[in-house]
Image (cartoon, rainbow, N blue to C red):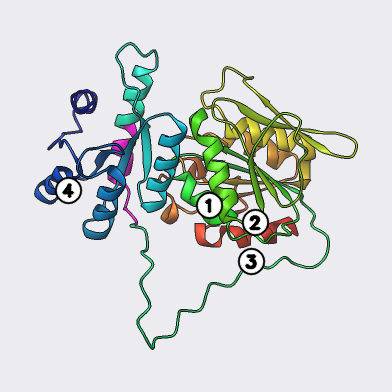
């Protein structure tokens, strides 16, 4: 695995692998000695596992870490925990030369390493222990639901690299009586989206589930598109139904943010709010273009708070974003825009 990753990375003249390590303890020593711009770290290692090593990195010498993950339910849960601890993204462990996806994996790996190396890394804020006799800090004000009827009842979120912590931050700040249904296209492997939805459901006041064909969109519920498939909606006479399908097969990303947002735009028009969060590339751009034509509104995550400012930048550069919002303020912006 170490040889395979080194070989892939050093095919790019802009990348140099300065050291490799056999376990977490050795890895920490190598990071201290070489001060690399980016670290790739396996979750499963002897002596010290990847999650433990990642905690040490974030406390002692914060920097971008890409986790290497097996595409299993167990691997997904560990990877989501790593992202919560501060890892910026992950790459699949299935790097066998017989894999048909090997070229795409190699390209993605090199592209991700170069992108995140150039970004200003924002280390996660540790929860400091409260000293005796010191009052706790005032909690951030909860997102308050405005009075009156919401003008928009469907929120479509498109997100990729750096997405899981960003989505968790947004959804966990929404009130239980959130007046709209939420549909999410997060670029993720098939084994990850179920555990991702389950993790979100455990920390949010709203309900979160992996979407299934035939689900009826309900207020206060978020539906995560299954990895490897697209999520779309159908407006019926008295309800909105969800559809999960591999079509269109031509889409680069599955699930695709553009496919989802365009479907929402065509289904409910001006009743839709599109939200584009951190991610590489421009997925979501064409969907938001249709959304704006149909009278919907669009929000983009700010450059300063993105892990990778690609997807939001695409809609900002095209003049399609109604607001550019820091991730900490996104839940409040979503709520207020339902009533705009």
The CA span between labels 3 and 4 is 40 Å
Secondary structure beneath label 3: loop
Most foreground residue, 195 or 309 = 195
1 or 4: tag closer to the N-terminus: 4
Q: CA distance from mark 4 to mark 2?
A: 40 Å
Quadrant assignment for the C terminus: bottom right
Q: CA distance from mark 1 to mark 3?
A: 15 Å
When asked about the image quadrant of residue 94, the answer is top left
The residue lying furthest to the front in this view is 47
- Label at residue 28: 4
Magenta-span inclusion, residue 120: yes
- Badge 2 is on which residue? 334
Determine crowd level at label 2: few under 14, some 14-19, many 20+ residues with C-alpha closer than 10 A. many
How far apart are labels 2 and 1 at the CA level?
14 Å
The nearer-to-camera label among 1 and 3 is 1
- Density class for disc 1 (Cα within 10 Å; few <14, some 14-19, many ≥20) is some
* Count of all numbered marks drawn on residues in the image: 4
**Residue 217: in magenta span:** no
- As drawn, 304 above or below 37: below
Residue 326 visible in the displayed image = no
Q: Quadrant of the N terminus?
A: top left
Q: CA distance from mark 1 to mark 4?
A: 29 Å
- Image coordinates of residue 2 in percent, x first then y, are 20, 28
- Mark 2 vs mark 1: in front: 1
Provide the major secondary structure of the magenta segment: helix
Circle 3/circle 4 CB separation < 8 Å: no
The residue that mark 1 highlights is: 168
Looking at the image, is mark 2 or mark 1 earlier in the sequence? 1
């Amino acid at each position: 695995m170490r040889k395979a990753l080194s070989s892939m990375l050093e095919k790019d003249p802009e990348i140099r692998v300065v050291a490799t390590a056999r376990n977490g303890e050795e890895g920490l020593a190598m990071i201290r000695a070489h001060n690399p711009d980016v670290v790739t770290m396996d979750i499963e290692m002897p002596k010290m596992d990847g999650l433990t090593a990642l905690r040490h990195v974030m406390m002692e010498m914060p920097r971008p870490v890409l986790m290497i993950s097996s595409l299993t339910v167990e691997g997904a849960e560990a990877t989501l925990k790593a992202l919560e601890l501060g890892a910026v993204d992950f790459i699949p462990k299935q790097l066998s030369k017989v894999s048909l996806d090997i070229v795409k994996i190699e390209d993605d790996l090199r592209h991700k390493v170069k992108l995140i190396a150039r970004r200003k890394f924002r280390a996660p804020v540790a929860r400091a222990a409260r000293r005796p006799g010191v009052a706790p800090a005032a909690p951030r004000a909860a997102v308050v639901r405005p009075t009156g009827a919401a003008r928009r009842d469907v929120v479509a979120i498109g997100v990729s690299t750096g997405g899981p912590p960003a989505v968790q931050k947004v959804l966990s700040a929404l009130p239980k009586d959130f007046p709209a249904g939420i549909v999410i296209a997060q670029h993720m492997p098939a084994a990850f989206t179920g555990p991702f939805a389950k993790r979100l459901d455990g920390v949010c006041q709203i309900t979160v589930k992996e979407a299934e064909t035939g689900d009826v969109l309900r207020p206060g519920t978020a539906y995560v598109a299954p990895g490897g498939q697209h999520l779309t909606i159908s407006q019926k006479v008295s309800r909105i139904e969800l559809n999960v399908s591999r079509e269109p097969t031509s889409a680069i990303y599955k699930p695709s943010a553009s496919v989802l947002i365009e479907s929402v735009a065509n289904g409910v028009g001006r009743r839709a709010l599109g939200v584009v969060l951190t991610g590489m590339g421009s997925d979501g751009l064409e969907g938001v273009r249709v959304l704006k034509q149909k009278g919907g509104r669009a929000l983009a995550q700010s450059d300063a708070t993105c892990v990778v400012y690609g997807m939001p930048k695409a809609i900002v550069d095209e003049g399609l974003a109604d607001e550019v919002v820091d991730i900490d303020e996104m839940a409040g912006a979503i709520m207020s825009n339902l009533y705009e």
